[in-house]
Image: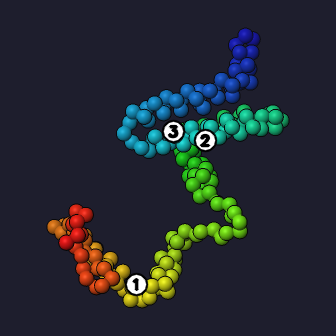
Amino acid sequence: MGSGSFFKVLAKNFDVLAGPLITLVYPLYASVKAIETKSPIDDQQWLTYWVLYSLITLFELTFAKVIEWFPFWPYAKLIFNCWLVLPYFSGASYVYQHYVRPFFVNQQTIHIWGMPRNKDVFSRPDDILSAAEIYIQENGPEAFEKLIAKARRKSKYASNSYVTSDEIEDNSGNYSVIHDDTRY
């Protein structure tokens, strides 16, 4: 009967015993190993995990009174942390790439004084064509043709490995050769 009650206590407190091992001990060990390797992939995995662990901890601290009403919370948290930690699932990378990163990287600006938001020129796939049309409207088709010719000359020079200078046309139609920050 003694071993039966031991396993009963172990089963009832599994989340308390396994939680620190899964959420702290193993990630700490894996993070130290990741620091010692030269691969940035494992560094990203464990930095991502620690960001998510911080967010989970902040969530728990903020909503502690509400979480107390859910008896399954410790088990759900343990399963979620297993999914985040185990490299087989790469859950930390998935959550970070699909939920956390878009929230922090693509922050929306607040419109103050009713000013319209400055849109990024290349936010849609067809924006290169739109940018070209706007450039033609503002500068004329001749300026656009000169820009295309300049880009072709640069790509021609870039394809020749022995040429290390750039040729630039100024407003008067003259060409300058720039080499090592010096005009000739």
Q: Give the image location of residue 93, x and y in percent.
A: 54, 47
Q: Say whether disc 1 or disc 2 marks the residue closer to the N-terminus.
A: 2
Q: Quadrant of residue 53?
A: top right
* In contact (CB < 8 Å): disc 3 and disc 1: no
Which residue is tagged 1? 144
Q: Quadrant of the N terminus?
A: top right
Q: Quadrant of the C terminus?
A: bottom left
Along the viewing direction, whichever of 49 and 183 lies nearer the viewer: 183
Q: Is residue 167 above or below residue 26?
A: below
Q: Is residue 111 left or right of residue 143?
A: right
Q: Say whether disc 3 or disc 1 marks the residue closer to the N-terminus.
A: 3
Kindly identify the residue that appears in the image at 71 percent across and 68 percent down. 114
Nearer the observer: mark 3 or 1; the answer is 1
Which residue is tagged 3? 46
Q: Amino acid at mark 1?
A: Phe
The answer, for residue 13, to whether it is visible in the render is yes
Q: Give the image location of residue 13, x and y in percent.
A: 72, 23
Residue farthest to the right, as pictured = 69
Q: Give the image location of residue 92, x and y in percent.
A: 57, 44
